[in-house]
Amino acid sequence: MWSFYFSELIHSLPFFLKGLWMTVAVSGLSLIMGTIIGFIWGIIRASRNKILRSLIGAWVDLIRGTPFLVQVFIVFFILPGIGIELEAFPAAVIALTNLAACFICEIVAGGILAVPSGQREAARASGLSAYQQLRYIILPQAMRTILPPLVGQYVLLVKDSSVVSAIGVVDVTRVGWLTVQRIPEGIMVFGLVGILYFVICYPLINLSNILERRMTVVATKL
Amino acid sequence: MISFKNVNKWFGDLHVLNNINLEVEKGEVVVVCGPSGSGKSTLIRCINRLEPIQEGELIVDDMKVHDKKTNMTQIRAEIGFIFQSFNLYPHMTALGNVTIAPIKVRKVKKEEAEKLGQQTLERVGLGGKAGAYPAQLSGGQQQRVAIARGLCMRPKIMLFDEPTSALDPEMINEVLDVMVDLAKEGMTMIVVTHEMGFAREVAKRVVFMDEGQIIEIAPPEKFFTKPKSDRAKLFLSKILTH
Ligand SMILES: Nc1ncnc2c1ncn2[C@@H]1O[C@H](COP(=O)(O)OP(=O)(O)O)[C@@H](O)[C@H]1O
Ligand SMILES: [Mg+2]
């Protein structure tokens, strides 16, 4: 029986690969957009604009304090109620982009605030504009603090993307659900699902570790 | 060149600058001293508006620093500021440190800025260290790079906030020597320092501050030998016994 299911599973591989591609697409798109938005929010969050700063802070707390599944449902089921009709795929990307932006915002703001204040002062005193201070003095130094946890966050977000299967996005997790109904060998099916996530995440975990080591080396040199 | 008229500043309840009046002429060297917390740093940080003032007039090179509408970029480009803790950019070489502002603020071409940067590093005795990162330099060398960084903007004024107090004693003179040369070349300078030798050699006046007020302004010789105020006497007796 087991070997019969196993060969069935092998036959389903193309289906799994399609799911894998969907997971990569949803999380890849969300990570790219979430990184851009997260940097913008993080820069504002570390700035001196009190109103914008606390507005973003409140939003980040709200998102971090509610389950991602609920956020996905709100985007997919509740937004149509106010006239915003979304397919599952864009709804998933929007929810995950927002989640990514919130986590990345905190990492970026933390990195910027960790740069000694004398750096900004010296840059300011020399006449560099606010943008130039950020671009040439603050961010290059902050990146050492930002990069390792940023890549680590990517790993978490790829895994979180499995939640979007709940609104019908056919990602790896959903493929697992659909397959297990034909092949009732849960361990086998979801073992494969797990392996596929690991295939995406493992290089990222390695990258994060390498960055961590590099940045500590650089930091001790400074 | 620099003119404080009835300048007041508060940090919350703390009256950190109390009715400051001070004129500094072009080419003049003024030394500011006083007990810790008396407002010396704040005084010079107001000149390039690292700190805003709340009352009074502060005019630098005919520009109104006290006016919120004044564009500070131009004024800051003309004022070099040297910090106690150097504040060199750790991710850039010495040459990178001294060329970034000329390139980005003054829009000098990179090759030209690097030529000027190299010359300026040579002027402070660090021609061979252009490629070194701050972490590879001693404190005295870092502070000299910081001075070169200020000079590369071809400033009209140089402000120094206790430039030698973070240095090991054997490195103090290499920095003071550079500052003495600058003074003799006619740079307008305000220097917060307790280095009496430096004050005696180049300063025209010593400004003594306490609790946010200017208590006494006198030529160095007079101030160090016959201070008028009791507070200055007390202060001098303390730094002399050190
Ligand atoms: N950014 C600030 N916020 C609040 N208080 C400050 C700030 N900067 C300085 N002070 C206070 O103002 C006083 C004068 O400080 P400062 O100008 O640094 O004195 P000095 O340089 O003579 O030691 C001190 O009591 C200090 O604690
Ligand atoms: Mg001070």
Image (cartoon, grey):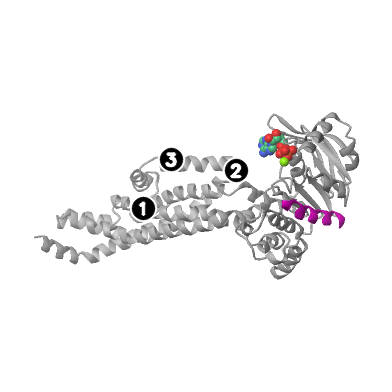
Q: What is the spatial separation of the Cα atoms under label 3 and label 2, in whole angstroms?
A: 20 Å
Q: Going from the N terminus, do you reach mark 3 or mark 2 first?
A: 2
- Amino acid on which the number 3 mark rests in the picture: Leu
Label 1 SS: helix
Circle 2 sits on which residue? A49
Question: On residue A92, which mark appears?
Answer: 1
Residue A13 in sight from this viewpoint: yes
Question: In this view, which residue lies farthest toward the left?
Answer: A1
Question: On residue B36, which mark appears?
Answer: none
- Amino acid on which the number 2 mark rests in the picture: Asn
At a point 60% along the width and 48% down the height, the residue shown is: A116
Label 3 SS: helix
Q: Could you classify mark 1 by the number of other residues whose Cα lies within 10 Å: few (under 14), some (14-19), or many (20 or more)?
A: many
At a point 39% along the width and 60% down the height, the residue shown is: A206
Label 3 marks which chain's residue? A
Q: Could you classify mark 2 by the number of other residues whose Cα lies within 10 Å: few (under 14), some (14-19), or many (20 or more)?
A: few
Q: Residue A134: where, in percent of width, then height?
A: 60, 54
Magenta range is B170-185
Q: What is the spatial separation of the Cα atoms under label 1 and label 2, in whole angstroms?
A: 31 Å
Q: Going from the N terminus, do you reach mark 1 or mark 2 first?
A: 2
Q: What is the spatial separation of the Cα atoms under label 1 and label 3, in whole angstroms?
A: 18 Å
Side of A89 relative to B45 (left or right)? left
Q: Quadrant of ligand 1?
A: top right
Q: Nearer the viewer, residue A64 or A178?
A: A64
The verdict on label 3 being within 8 Å of ligand 1 is: no
Question: Depth-wise, is mark 1 or mark 2 nearer the camera?
Answer: 2
Label 2 marks which chain's residue? A
- The C terminus of chain A sits in image quarter: bottom right
Circle 3 sits on which residue? A62
Question: Depth-wise, is mark 1 or mark 3 nearer the camera?
Answer: 3
